[in-house]
Image (spheres, coloured by chain):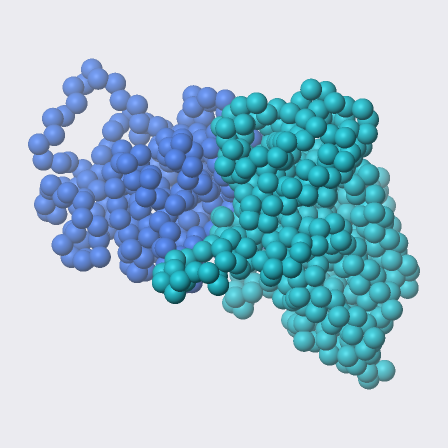
Amino acid sequence: MAPLAEDANLLSTSDPNNVRKWLAAHHPKQLSMLDKFEIELRLGRLSTSSTAAARTSSLGEVGMFGTTDRRLVTSRTVELLKSLIGSTRWRNAAQLLALLRGIGQELHAAGGFREPAIGNVVRRVMAAVREETLNEEPSDSTKKAAPTGADMESIDELEDNMGNMSLKRNTGVGGSASRSTKMSLTNMLWDHPQGIKRSSSGRHRSDSFSSMGSDSPLPSSETAGQFPPIYYANRPDLRQSVMEAIQEIMSDLEDLHKNINDQATSHIHAGEIILTYGRSKTVELFLKAAAAKKRKFQVVVCEGAPHFGGHAMANSLAEAGIDTTVINDSATFAIMARVNKVLLPSHAVLANGGLIAPSGSNMVALAAKNNSVPVVVVGGMFKLCPMYPHEGQDTLQDLVSPSAVIDLAEMGDKLVSEVEFVNPVHDYILPQNISLYITNIGAFQPSYIYRLLAEYYHSDDWESFE
Amino acid sequence: MTDPDPATVDDYPIVIQDLLHYLGPRTSLDDKSAVALPVAAIKALLQVVQRSKANTMMGLQDELKESSQSMLDYALEGTLLGRSHIALASGCELFLKYITRTFLETPDFDACKGQVLERGEHFAGISLAARDRIANVGHGFIRDGQTVLTHGWSRVVAALLLKAAETTHFDIVILEGRPDAAGAKAAALYAQEGIPTKVVLDSAMGYVMESVDLVLVGAEGVVENGGIVNKMGTFALAVNAQESNVPFYVAAESYKFARLYPLHQKDLPTMGGLNQQHLDFVDTASWHRTGREGPSSTKKQQDTNATSTPHEPSNTVSGIVTIPHNVKVDNPPCDYTPAKYITLLFTDLGVLTPSAVSDELIRLYQ
């Protein structure tokens, strides 16, 4: 049993090195899968079509449009997680979460910071694990209630009602059936908030939240205190339910475009002029779905310099029989007065409702705001990121080589040394400049995004991978 | 706003004495560890529970309601920081709600009482822990080289800015904060910690807005739609900030969330009591009210136009004509800032958009 005890220690702290060691010791095959995935990530082979265009065109290769798309990244990640979780020997929910956190950190460091969708998928799985852990506990009302309950029989019904009320409010994956695990005003003040991490600054005040509340006695050791006791219970059925949850996520991803396209006809009407920017598979499929339902509309596509994804987009739309026009990026403002709707793709949706989109989208959004044209963003829920744009326009800070903008070989030395070329991949768009987000679960306003975040991810997992 | 005369303290009901006791001595500048009013109130209410001779929940609740009301009345008289009145009310309501909930879980009255008292002992750290958490979630929004504009004196904002100063270089611009020199107090603290600080007139808020990167204020109370009640001038500041596309952030603990829904400025509950009918201008240049020496003694202070000497009495400025008695004066301490001007709220529940506040309130009072 000694190796297993060692496992417990290794997996209790989610230091990525520990996860690696644990995998190396017990599951080398899975470790090599993880390594291969990371290599592909670092090489940039897994990225969105528009950013792939940005990256590959800057390397001088022909753009590989259409072969790599976002869903591929996320499906690959989910498959990797499925295999890692399914075939490894973790014993309880706490170990599983530690494993996932470690994987998340590894992937984030390997290039996941460029592809927020990867971190989002891992967080999604973690939230599913938490939900399964809490849902499957025996309906023992003493566990759900915070205090050391006395005689519960007389008020079981009332307790159930209160529990049910909170269940109804907290639907969805990250909702967490038991109200005592959700951070709320009452928990903040009276209960020990379960799962709250020790402050990363290391300062452990004796009067801070972590030590308050006498109801859930926590062991003093760092490792055991990371999760509430329920996570350490050994439950054989957990693996099965977690695998089912992952399967659900996979099927969500597969049906993604179908669910988005079903809403196409509610948003695109006959005779409309729709403006879009550059190339995006989601937007393309959305428009084609509307056209397939015999709606007659026109599309104006901004060419999207310097990689000109708009050209391929226009080709593709024209082949589907849609009346398409390609314009210069600089003509966007001039034509905006005639446009009825702007349709933008998304790279990531941030916690405040803001949007990270291909570079150039902010210009389109500002022009649209100026002309009171609604800006509609299409994208799947896996793009929803629990991150705030601290750095404003520099969020994600992804710059690629300026060789796409200018031919370095032809430039004189002076030009090279005294002129700075900036070629960003993304733009950040403020939430007030966006009218609507269309996702696979429906259409939402930017001010509602916080709610979706709470339902999809558990608040403890937000900062996990930095 | 003078300290209560010690000779008359014993005349007050016991709960008020407790409240004053828990608030502690009014230190002037370094009250980073000072207890917030609602926290002291809850502690006083815990004492009520301890002393209570009631045998039923109804009796206990009545006693608590009575004590809360007397504390509120006392606060309204203006002798006790009339501005924090909203947070006081919401704190008391929260406590009553908690008692009810605990009783529903633990129907045995004595056990319930014991539990409340046991947990309550740890309540001391609430305010400090909340501030820590707010500082953690909020300090990342201040980047190197930015200029932060702030208004009013708030311990939460101070905690956040000091935490940010540990890792970031930024400037602070503070509005003077009439009539109570709140700005001077804040400026002294930040300057002491080595952050480049500048004080400007309240009316200069529009003028400086173009050189400011973000605005950060505290709150006396957060209302249901996500708006805030804060020191007079916050509303104008928020409108100004929105006009200049400057993000407007609010730092507030979650016990300040109140079940109020003001539609107009007039909908705010009256606070400030007797002081509202007076214009009590503090000579902010002389720093007397902040307990510091005059501007010549500390070099890091700002360079306001100090027209008065440090030796004049602190509540007159030479050359001012006194107001005729038939001119009415209205000096409410707080105003209401609607949610649409607020970008984000930093609370101990995390970063919230104004729309999320009502969700939290519903969850609490369900």
For residue B39, side relative to residue B312 (left or right): right
Residue A307 image point, x, y percent: 59, 49
Residue B352: x %, y % from top left: 57, 43
Along the line of sight, which residue is nearer the eye, A248 or B72?
Answer: A248
* Residue A427 shows up from this direction: yes
Kindly indicate the quadrant of the structure image that contains residue B318: top left
Residue B234, position in %: x, y?
A: 38, 34
Tell me which residue sits at (15%, 36%) in the image: B316
Q: Is residue B104 visible?
A: no
Q: Is residue A234 above or below residue B191?
A: below
Q: Is the residue B225 above or below the residue B195 in the image?
A: above
The C terminus of chain B, quarter of image = top right
Question: Looking at the picture, how far across and down is residue A176, in whole percent?
Answer: 75, 48
Residue, far front: A410
The residue under the point 12% across, 30% down is B320
The number of numbered badges drawn on the structure is 0
Instruction: Identify whether B166 is placed above or below A431.
Output: below
Q: Quadrant of the N terminus of chain B?
A: top left
Determine the residue positioned at 72% across, 48% down: A382
As drawn, the residue found furthest toward the top would be: B326
Q: Nearer the viewer, residue A455 or A159?
A: A455
Q: Colour of chain A?
A: cyan
Q: Is residue A258 above or below residue A112?
A: above
| Figure chain in blue | B
User: Viewer-proximal residue, B348 or B237?
Assistant: B237
Who is closer to the viewer here, B34 or B50? B34
Q: Residue at x 83, y 75 (%)?
A: A29
